Amino acid sequence: MTQQPAAQPTGTPAAKSSRLAIPDLISIGIFTALYFVCVCVATLISALVAGAGTIFLPAVAALICGPVFMLSVARVGKFGGITVMGVVIGLFLFVSGHFALSFVASIVFPLAGDLIARIGNYKNRITILIGYVVFCYGLTGPILPLWFMKDAYVASLQARGKDSAYIDNLFSQISVGSFFVAMAAILVCGLIGGWFGQRILKKHFVKAGIA
């Protein structure tokens, strides 16, 4: 008599696919929209800071966007989720008139952050936190030309009708020192914002098996 295969126990959850599915892309879209709202808030906050406010936009965003990023990782937890979020933001920046460098940064840093979070299989708080910090540098695309493409940046501002007083004020804080300060601010704010995001989403992390 042919032996029948053993029946699968009822109630056993199916293995989670490692590939992004339609529900994952929908979730990423929602979290990207929330992230974009946080970036807009960060832009308003930066606009209130005279002179060097613009160069600290990525740092301010890193400080307040942590919860959205962490919730996205807890809900999606698959390779590509972080990258897609960064690419979508980069596309928006590029379409809105920023230099191509903004799009490049929005690919390179989110992809690197995705790879780092993947080391811990999206289940390790430390690798997720480091991944978030690296991801935050994706917003440096719009400000890097201030240091490395000054002439082109000035020309683009003039084409958009900005007067010399505005341009002089913008570049008054641009120096080698301010570059390192701005980059260090992203690191510090990313660590704080990411840690805070993990703290307030502790229940979601436990549910997702993140330790």
Image: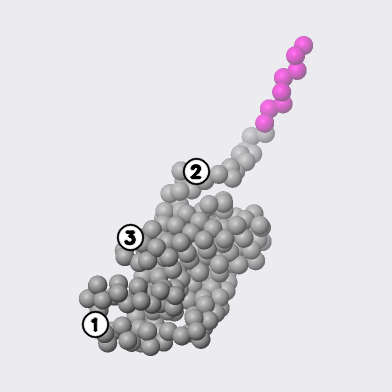
Q: Disc 2 marks which amino acid?
A: Ala
The residue at the far right in this view is: 1
> What percent of the width, then of the height, locates residue 188?
56, 78
**Where does the C terminus fall, quadrant-wise?**
bottom right
Name the residue that disc number 3 marks: 95
Q: Which numbered disc, 2 or 3, marks the residue that appears first in the sequence? A: 2
Q: Does the rendering let one see residue 26?
A: yes
Say few, some or many: other residues with alpha carbon within 10 Å of mark 1 (under 14 / 14 to 19 / 20 or more). few
Name the residue that disc number 1 marks: 163
Which residue occupies 51% across, 53% down? Answer: 81
Which residues make up the magenta segment?
1-8
Say few, some or many: other residues with alpha carbon within 10 Å of mark 2 (under 14 / 14 to 19 / 20 or more). few
Which residue occupies 31% across, 63% down? Answer: 96
> What percent of the width, then of the height, locates residue 205?
59, 60
SS for callout 2: loop
Instruction: Give the answer, above or below, for where 3 lies relative to 14.
Output: above
Name the residue that disc number 2 marks: 21
Question: Is label 1 in contact with label 3 (beta carbons under 8 Å)?
Answer: no
Residue 91: image quadrant is bottom left
